[in-house]
Image (spheres, rainbow, N blue to C red):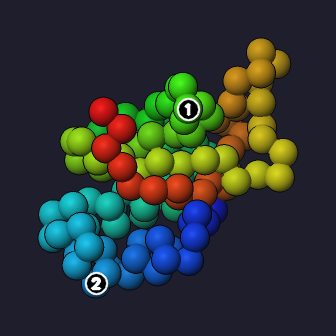
Amino acid sequence: MQISFRNSKLGKVLNSERQLLVVYGQDNGRRIARRLQNIADAATLEELSRLPHTRVHQLTGDRDEQISVDVRHPYCLILACDHDETPRKPDGGLDWARITKVQVIEIADTH
């Protein structure tokens, strides 16, 4: 999948292994880098959801249509579809099989 970032500051941190380790620590930094690589390697969001330990799921409430990808409890990568027109199923839900571009919004504890 193609990955973009909510802003340049987040992109700078997440695109630099050194910055990841400084900001998030050794263990979490490496896990975040691995998860970003998983996202980049997957063709679609549906393919990503089949990987072990990713626990990909759609959020609700004020985070409706955002996607959470586990890094290490309690931290998750929060993604949004980055298509011009959001791929949808006939029932109106997100069509994970057609989502090939995502934007990393933040790394957060949503629990």
Mark 1 vs 2: CB contact within 8 A = no
Please identify the quarter of the rendering in which residue 95 is found: top right
Instruction: Please name the residue that numbered disc 2 is placed on.
Output: 18
Q: Residue at x 77, y 15 (%)?
A: 91
Which secondary structure lies at badge 2? helix
Q: Nearer the viewer, residue 22 or 86?
A: 22
Side (left or right) of 62 relative to 87: left
Which secondary structure lies at badge 1? helix
Q: Quick one: label 2, few (<14), some, or many (20+) residues within 10 Å?
A: some
**In the rendered view of the protein, which quadrant contains the C terminus?**
top left
- Please tell me whether mark 1 or mark 2 is closer to you in this view: 1
**In the rendered view of the protein, which quadrant contains the N terminus?**
bottom right
Residue sticking out furthest to the top: 91
The amino acid sitting under disc 2 is Arg
Where is residue 17? Give x, y as percent: 32, 79
Side (left or right) of 58 relative to 109: right
The amino acid sitting under disc 1 is Asp
> Relative to residue 101, is residue 94 depicted above or below?
above
Instruction: Please name the residue that numbered disc 1 is placed on.
Output: 62
Please identify the quarter of the rendering in which residue 21 is found: bottom left
> Relative to residue 50, is residue 38 depicted above or below?
below
